[in-house]
Image: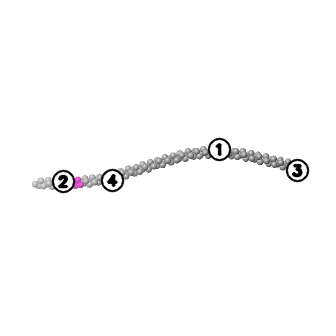
Amino acid sequence: KDALDMSNSDKSMLEDERQNLLELKSQEIEVLQREFESKTAEKTSLQTQVRDKDDEVSKLRTSNELMAKTIEDCGVLMQQKSTENERLMQHLESMKESFDTIQEQLNEKELKIAQLEASLESLKIAQLE
């Protein structure tokens, strides 16, 4: 009977040990489950951050493309203005040459008028004498 009781006692001890192991395993599973949930949340957060950064990069690329187009347009406009300025400078130079020619002709005519007035004055003096 002692052997049988010992056996029951051993069985009881084994059962207690089994229950303790089950409880430990259950606690390990809970810890692992919480870690898994934490890692899943972290992964979701990182995926959101990556999406946000991708959106930022996309916006920056679009902005850079717009700036590049604007710079290109400014370059074309500057070239057009430069060409227009050159044309205006040539026109201005031409007008200056015309003005200089007219000024020379005016000076010649004023000299001629002064000569004619002097001649007229001489004739008047001669006529009076």
- Left or right of residue 45: residue 68: right
**Residue 90 vertical position relative to residue 23 in the rendered view, above or below:** above
**Mark 3 or mark 2: which is in front?**
3
Instruction: Report x, y in % for residue 53.
Output: 42, 50
Tag 1 secondary structure? helix
Earlier in the chain: of badge 2 and badge 1, it is 2
Quadrant in the picture for the N terminus: bottom left
How far apart marks 2 and 4 lie (CA) works out to: 36 Å
Earlier in the chain: of badge 4 and badge 3, it is 4
Residues at circles 2 and 1 in contact by the CB criterion of under 8 Å: no
Task: State how the image is colored.
Answer: one colour
Instruction: Report x, y in % for residue 68.
Output: 51, 46
Residue of label 1 = 90
Q: Residue at x 53, y 45 (%)?
A: 72
**Mark 2 or mark 4: which is in front?**
4
How far apart marks 4 and 3 lie (CA) works out to: 129 Å
**Dot 4, how many residues are within 10 Å of its Cα: few (below 14), some (14-19), or many (20+)?**
few
How far apart marks 3 and 2 lie (CA) works out to: 164 Å
Residues at circles 3 and 1 in contact by the CB criterion of under 8 Å: no
Q: Main secondary structure of the magenta part?
A: helix
Q: Identity of the amino acid at label 3? A: Leu
How far apart marks 3 and 1 lie (CA) works out to: 56 Å
Q: Nearer the viewer, residue 67 or 121?
A: 121
Residue of label 4 = 38
Earlier in the chain: of badge 1 and badge 4, it is 4
Residue of label 3 = 128
Magenta range: 11-23
Q: Nearer the viewer, residue 4 or 121?
A: 121
Earlier in the chain: of badge 2 and badge 4, it is 2
